[in-house]
Image (tube, rainbow, N blue to C red):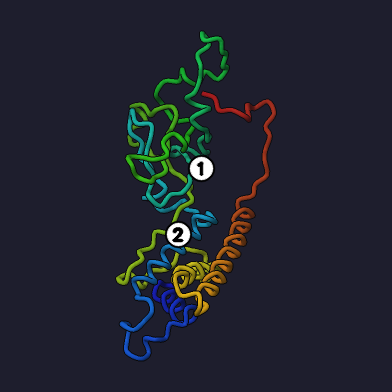
């Protein structure tokens, strides 16, 4: 559905806002800009709760250019999570790790023996990545990717390709009414239930608007649960145990 079609569906078929028939938009209960804002909130909320928008092809979202001496990079503002990352022309993914497994090591001289000795790895080709090193990047709400070890001179301008979960990138404005929704078609109408909830939640309860708003919220929450189950089914994969092949750790 285009934004124009969503707006009409929300105003006419869901909210029954037909006061514009008499004397134009000025007498409508909600302006177009208000409803477009609710549609934006609804789609972002649906995408965030279901993690249903997966992307591996949009360059500005899925590609990071590495720089020598720079370990941490901010992802696109729409990114919610990094599913996997692949170094340049490799045919396999980097190992996913975390701050606690990579950087919080105690040297052996402090009575702790760590066979991985990851803290001794010099700058060079990345072998692992993590997304929990910096949760707020430069005071912006962006997910960050930290590669390990820090890229060296040979890795300068190499590309890290990612698979991500992200929010919609649609332009929600009266000048972008022909833009298509990025949600799966099966859930586009369901997302509008949250927009309707936003629109009706502040109305007079004596007129029954609050009760109707709650119904819209319940319908939205039900659709979220269905979408979550669908996303889990699509991401299901059998676990492989590789005996004798160092299957539980990355090495250099």
Q: Which of disc 2 and disc 1 is earlier in sequence?
A: 2
User: Which image quadrant for residue 218?
Assistant: bottom right
- Where residue 124 appears, as percent x and y from the top left, is 40, 25
Q: Residue at x 49, y 69 (%)?
A: 197
Please determine whether, in this image, residue 124 is positioned above or below residue 179: above
Front residue (pair 146, 139): 139
Please determine whether, in this image, residue 41 is positioned above or below residue 87: below
Q: Which residue is drawn at 38% across and 31% down?
A: 71
Give the class, few, some or many, for how many residues have Cα within 10 Å of label 1's Cα (few <14, many ≥20): some
- Where residue 12 appears, as percent x and y from the top left, is 45, 82
- Where residue 30 appears, as percent x and y from the top left, is 37, 76
Task: Name the residue at the bottom extreme.
Answer: 22
- Where residue 204 appears, as percent x and y from the top left, is 46, 75
Instruction: Give the residue number, with chain letter if any, for mark 1.
Output: 84
Asked which secondary structure carries label 1, the reply is strand
Q: Which residue is drawn at 35% across and 91% down?
A: 22
- Spatial CA distance of label 1 from label 2 is 22 Å
**How many discs appear?**
2
Q: Which mark is residue 25?
A: none
User: Which image quadrant for residue 33?
Assistant: bottom left
Asked which secondary structure carries label 2, the reply is helix
Give the class, few, some or many, for how many residues have Cα within 10 Å of label 2's Cα (few <14, many ≥20): many
Please determine whether, in this image, residue 206 is positioned above or below residue 90: below
Q: Residue at x 53, y 55 (%)?
A: 49
Front residue (pair 40, 246): 40
Task: Name the residue at the front extreme.
Answer: 206
* Mark closer to the observer (1, 2): 2
Instruction: Give the residue number, with chain letter if any, for mark 2.
Output: 44
């Amino acid at each position: 559905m285009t934004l124009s079609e969503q707006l009409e569906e929300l105003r006419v078929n869901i909210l029954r806002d037909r006061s514009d028939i008499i004397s134009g938009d000025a007498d409508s209960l909600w302006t177009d800009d208000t409803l477009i804002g609710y549609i934006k909130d609804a789609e972002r909320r649906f995408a965030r709760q279901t993690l249903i928008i997966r992307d591996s092809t949009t360059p500005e979202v899925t590609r990071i250019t590495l720089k020598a001496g720079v370990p941490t990079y901010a992802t696109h503002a729409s990114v919610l999570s990094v599913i996997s990352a692949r170094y340049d022309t490799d045919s396999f993914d980097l190992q996913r790790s975390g701050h606690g497994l990579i950087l919080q090591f105690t040297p052996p001289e402090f009575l702790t023996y760590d066979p991985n000795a990851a803290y001794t790895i010099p700058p060079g080709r990345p072998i692992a990545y993590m997304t929990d090193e910096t949760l707020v990047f430069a005071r912006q709400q962006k997910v960050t990717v930290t590669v390990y070890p820090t890229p060296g001179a040979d890795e300068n301008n190499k590309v890290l390709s990612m698979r991500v979960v992200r929010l919609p990138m649609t332009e929600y404005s009266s000048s972008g009414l022909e833009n298509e929704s990025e949600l799966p078609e099966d859930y586009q109408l369901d997302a509008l239930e949250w927009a309707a909830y936003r629109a009706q939640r502040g109305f007079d309860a004596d007129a029954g608007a609050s009760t109707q708003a709650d119904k819209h919220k319940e319908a939205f929450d039900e659709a979220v649960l269905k979408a979550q189950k669908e996303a889990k089914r699509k991401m299901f994969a059998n676990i492989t145990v590789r005996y004798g092949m160092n299957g539980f750790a990355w090495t250099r």
